[in-house]
Image: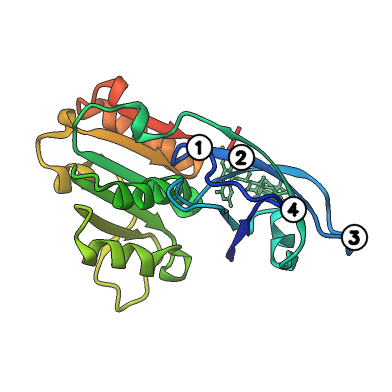
Amino acid sequence: MFGTIKMAPQEEVDSFDYLPGQFHFIKLYRGKNLPVEEHPFTISSSPTQQGILASTIKTSGDFTTTIQYTMPGDLARVQGPFGRFCYLLHPQKRDMVFIAGGVGITPLMSMLRYMQDAGEDRRVLLFYVNKTRRDIIFHDELHEIEKAGSLNLEVIYVLSRPDTDWGGEIGYLNGKKIQRYCGNGLADKEFYLCGPQQMMRQLIPDLRNLGVPESQIHFEKFFL
Ligand SMILES: Cc1cc2nc3c(=O)[nH]c(=O)nc-3n(C[C@H](O)[C@H](O)[C@H](O)COP(=O)(O)OP(=O)(O)OC[C@H]3O[C@@H](n4cnc5c(N)ncnc54)[C@H](O)[C@@H]3O)c2cc1C
């Protein structure tokens, strides 16, 4: 299960100064005996969206299971932005390959939203890996971005536990599947990865073995 919380400052500001893909620490004050803890979450909105910071949060443990009880009007203390997982920090004009596992889509989604607004013309291939179709976050919005055509985006969904009528990629993502879609020009692309530990442990060495230079492999870890 997942949900998105949107936060606006109590005093009016024109825009927030952050890069797409960065994260912040959020502390929620919601009363009702709900925990007041600070946790890191990606800013899944785009800096082009004025006056709002959004984070999309997946239920994974004690704190995140309480996200569903967050109500309009609850207060949040936000500290940030942090992180360097952002394509704007690597301005080489190479095509990009985004690889997301589960909720690891959030920083990549922020970048895609920003790219669409900024008129980015590079090709972006997104591999989005989930267990089931129901786990796919942002499906409709990704479809809209692909269809609109203002961003040169192609999304490849990969499911490890698909329904019988699933017509897309099945299993886990690996170097072989990536190469099938990218062809031989892997060393000419920038790779951005965010996903579960196991996925990153497999894919980063796969990319190195396929000849992608270290400087073109960028990743964000949601785990220690
Ligand atoms: C830079 C960064 C960005 C992030 N961005 C996002 C984001 O955009 N969206 C998002 O949803 N998350 C994001 N996260 C992860 C998020 O911070 C954590 O999921 C959250 O802090 C977990 O808090 P919790 O108290 O709910 O989980 P905890 O209770 O602390 O559990 C943490 C992990 O341990 C596992 N776990 C808990 N209990 C058990 C158990 N009994 N047995 C086995 N495993 C268990 C859970 O599966 C969970 O993955 C981000 C993390 C970082 C570092």
Q: Is mark 2 on a helix, strand or loop?
A: strand
- Say which amino acid is labelled 4: Phe
Looking at the picture, how far across and down is residue 220, in whole percent?
A: 47, 35
Measured Cα–Cα span from mark 4 to mark 2: 16 Å
User: Disc 4 or disc 1, which is closer to the eye?
Assistant: 1
Distance from mark 2 CB to nearest ligand 1 atom below 8 Å: no
Q: Which of marks 4 and 2 is nearer the N terminus?
A: 2
Considering the image in quadrants, where does the N terminus appear?
bottom right
Q: In which quarter of the image is residue 80?
A: top right
**Residue behind mark 1:** 18
Q: How many labels does the image show?
A: 4
Distance from mark 1 CB to nearest ligand 1 atom below 8 Å: no
Q: In which quarter of the image is residue 167?
A: bottom left
Q: Is residue 90 above or below residue 15?
A: above
- Say which amino acid is labelled 1: Tyr
Q: Which of marks 2 and 3 is nearer the N terminus?
A: 2
- Say which amino acid is labelled 2: His
Q: In this view, does 4 lie above or below 96?
A: below
Q: Residue furthest right?
A: 33
User: Disc 1 or disc 3, which is closer to the eye?
Assistant: 1
Measured Cα–Cα span from mark 2 to mark 3: 24 Å
The residue under the point 56% across, 54% down is 52
Measured Cα–Cα span from mark 4 to mark 1: 25 Å
Looking at the picture, how far across and down is residue 86, in whole percent?
A: 40, 34
Q: What element carries label 1?
A: loop
Tag of residue 33: 3
**Residue behind mark 4:** 63
Tag of residue 24: 2
